[in-house]
């Protein structure tokens, strides 16, 4: 029963602080004509407000995009935390292009999951502005 109370308290903490998350991508623009094997490094600077790095997972949704900029077959990878500098957390990831063509990406924050709570709650997905 104590584990349920801990999860409820964590969920309330995350929900109460979620709007305080801010982040921006400090990386190259998406590739217009990627070749198989091309690598696109991504760096994100994030301020988590009242949350800790253990409370969130920073993800990159990426893949080929159509003429309208919509993903045709999106993939998702989790970014790795690199450094913590004066309240800012740096995350990094590298996209490896598995197909040639036009690639895009979008960065989002979601609550960290221990497997007991659903990761995707529409009110707890934060996309980069």
Image: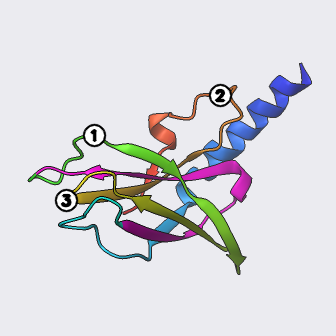
CA distance for labels 1 and 3: 12 Å
CA distance for labels 2 and 1: 26 Å
Residue 111 higher or lower than 91, as above or below: above
N-terminal-most mark, 2 or 3: 3
Which image quarter holds the C terminus? Answer: bottom left
Q: How is the image coloured?
A: rainbow
N-terminal-most mark, 1 or 3: 1
Foreground mark, 2 or 1, reads 1
Mark 1, residue position: 73
Residue 55 higher or lower than 47, as above or below: above
Q: Would residue 60 be counted in the magenta stretch?
A: yes
Helix, strand or loop status at disc 1:
loop
Mark 3, residue position: 102
Pointer 2: residues within 10 angstroms few (<14), some, or many (20+)?
Answer: few
* Residue 87 in sight: no
Q: Are marks 2 and 1 in contact (CB under 8 Å)?
A: no
Q: In which image quadrant can residue 96 be found? A: bottom left
Disc tally is 3
N-terminal-most mark, 2 or 1: 1
Q: Residue furthest left?
A: 67
Foreground mark, 2 or 3, reads 3
Magenta region: which residues? Answer: 39-66
Helix, strand or loop status at disc 3:
loop
Residue 45 higher or lower than 66, as above or below: below
Where residue 82 sits in the image (x, y, percent)? 66, 70
Q: Residue furthest right?
A: 2
Where residue 20 sits in the image (x, y, percent)? 57, 60
Mark 2, residue position: 117
Helix, strand or loop status at disc 2:
loop
């Amino acid at each position: 029963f104590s584990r349920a109370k801990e999860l409820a308290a964590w969920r309330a903490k995350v929900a109460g602080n979620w709007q305080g998350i801010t982040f921006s991508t400090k990386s190259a623009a998406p590739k217009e004509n990627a070749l198989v094997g091309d690598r696109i490094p991504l760096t994100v600077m994030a301020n988590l407000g009242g949350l800790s790095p253990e409370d969130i997972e920073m993800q990159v949704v990426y893949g080929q995009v159509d003429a309208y900029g919509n993903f045709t077959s999106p993939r998702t990878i989790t970014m790795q935390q690199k450094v913590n500098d004066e309240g800012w957390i740096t995350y990094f990831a590298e996209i490896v292009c598995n197909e040639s063509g036009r690639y895009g990406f979008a960065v989002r924050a979601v609550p960290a999951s221990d497997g007991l709570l659903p990761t995707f709650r529409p009110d707890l997905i934060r996309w980069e502005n």
